[in-house]
Image (cartoon, rainbow, N blue to C red):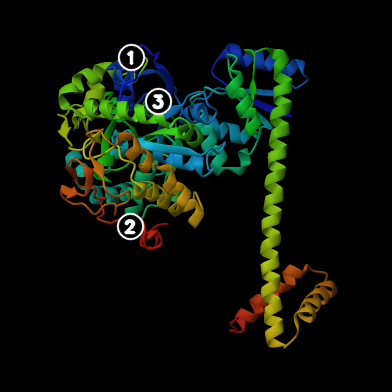
Amino acid sequence: MSAPPMSAPTPISIAFLPLTDSAPLVAAREKGFAAEAGFDLSLHRATSWATVRDMLVYGQVQGAHMLAPLAIAVTLGLSQHPAALSAPFKLNLNGNALAMSTEFVAALDPDPVKRIADPEGAAHDFAAAIGLHRRKPVVGIVHRYSSHALMLRYWLGYAGIDPDRDLALRVLPPSLMVEALRSGEIDGFIAGEPWSSVAVTAGLAEIVAVGSRIWRRGVEKVLAFRTDWMEDHADMVDRFLGAMARAAAWCDDPAHHGELAAMLERAGYVGQPAATILPALEGRILLRPGTAPVAIDDFMIFDREAANFPWRSQALWIYSQLVRWRMVEKDEATERRAADVFRSDVYRRALAGSDVPMPGASMKVEGAIATPTGVGSHSGALTLGPDRFFDGRVFDPHNIEAYLAGLSPR
Amino acid sequence: MRIVIVDDSGLRATVLEDGLREAGYDDIHLVPPLGAWVAKLERMAPDVVLMDLGSPSRDSLEEMLAVSRALARPIAMFVDQSDDQMIGAAIDAGVSAYVVDGLRKERVKPILDLAIRRFNAFAKMQADLDEARSALADRKTIDRAKALLMKSRDLPEPEAYALLRSTAMNQGRKIVEVAEALITAHSLLGGTE
């Protein structure tokens, strides 16, 4: 589906934050996938999610690399100027890590590998460590409506911690976390890579939990558009998603990780050394300064198993957490609007006829797959990998009430 | 009026401060967005906050606005270069005001006025909404009390309401207070509705 020859490329601009999971956008431009589809793709780097959001909402850019919960929050009118946003494509699954200062970590299990492998035990240890701390630990999050903040809340909530009562959550942009940790303003932070690795490499922190061990295939960033713009430019969106699907597949291929890390290293993109970016791509994470990196499979997924498919049930899981933490009132109309942000229909339309495997359904019970499982697919064979939540709980999008009733604190 | 400028660029802050002083404001404070600046801001209780649109610290400020009523203040954003489309859309949205045409000190006052006007309009809308919500809640309380009276004393609706109203007048209280007292007493006595 490339543009007719001789016609001028269509300009499209996308805002992004310097994070490893901006990779599919960077690859779409640098490896020519966007150009092949007839686009002149320009990428606008910002430092805060507020700026990315405003650039999208006020029409400075056509699309944005965005926190999935933020796209939902903007649509529900929870975050500054409300606007209907749509996410027809997920950029990645997981890729976050919680890094805590070496001082705080002294109160946890001394074996960093065990902490990652046993999130249940680590959550209880974390709760005990809060008691030992003479004040509430200050934990940096990148945004109130971020995937990682919701995962941190979910993980600690399991051990009876009420994040609004037992922690001081501080919002900082990811690129400022390491400095804040160095100056003692925060005791740790959860952010997208490479920032946790930067903190560990600098000898300031240890990684105590990773997103992929809290929710094995947790939603992370999406490609978001304004809904009205997306509807008015259906052909363009379809072509662009085609380019993004090829870029995401390229990023997922281990043979390309070295080249990808070198690309992201540039000042206009992530602007951190390739050696710090590579671990998240390879799933070999440095947990403690001066030790050997540890293999963590599925640490960050760009493409495989239809990772880009926007399951409506995943949007509803995010909604359920917003309700749980009293960020939004539970309400049927709100629930529907939240689910509608994830546009599986647009994904299907755009990638129909490509060799991208296509799930047969748009909702699934999240957390129910323990081992790789073949599922109904309209095209190609589709196997879904484990999507377990660390506590074994499953999320049935048709019964949010019962799910919420089983969660404590709420 | 106390104005806080959140900025880490000395030059920009100077232009803003000069513009504000020429416009007759003198309670102006500069807070660089470093360390515990949000807490500092809260303590200063400014009437207006000025901040750079591109500042990475905007997420922190927004978070504070989301959790702390103490900081429900007009926020004026400024940008360095002219960018009409975004500024127009932002102002229409009524959220913030933006300094256009680079950063000229003559532009500071109108922008500040606009930010305050927008904020006040928004605050009034919010207050009206809160009032409407509480009126609705009062109405429900009164309806429940009325139903109790109708059932326990076998009164028709207009008389039940008249009884509530005259009791309130006699005691110098609001009808909704009498209704609440009645509902509380009823539940203490083990009644069900």
Query: Mark number for residue A52?
Result: none
Residue A17 is marked as 3
Q: Is residue A409 above or below residue A274?
A: below
Q: How packed is label 2: few (under 14 Cα within 10 Å), some, or many (20 or more)?
A: some
Circle 3: is it few (<14), some (14-19), or many (20+) Cα within 10 Å? many
Same subunit under labels 2 and 3? Answer: yes
Give the SS element for disc 2: loop
Camera sees residue A144 = no
> Disc 2 marks which residue?
A396
Residue that appears at 16% across and 27% down: A254
Q: Quadrant of residue B151?
A: bottom right
Q: Is A392 situated left or right of B156 in this image?
A: left
Q: Residue at x 70, y 45 (%)?
A: B125
Judging depth in this view, the residue of A373 and B96 nearest the camera is A373
Q: Secondary structure at mark 3?
A: loop
Q: Residue B68 at x, y = what percent?
A: 57, 42
Mark 3 or 1, nearer chain start? 1
Task: Give me the C-alpha separation between circle 3 and circle 1.
Answer: 33 Å
Res A5 label? 1
Q: Amino acid at mark 2?
A: Asp
Q: Amino acid at mark 3?
A: Leu
Look at the image and tell me whether residue B136 can be seen. Answer: yes
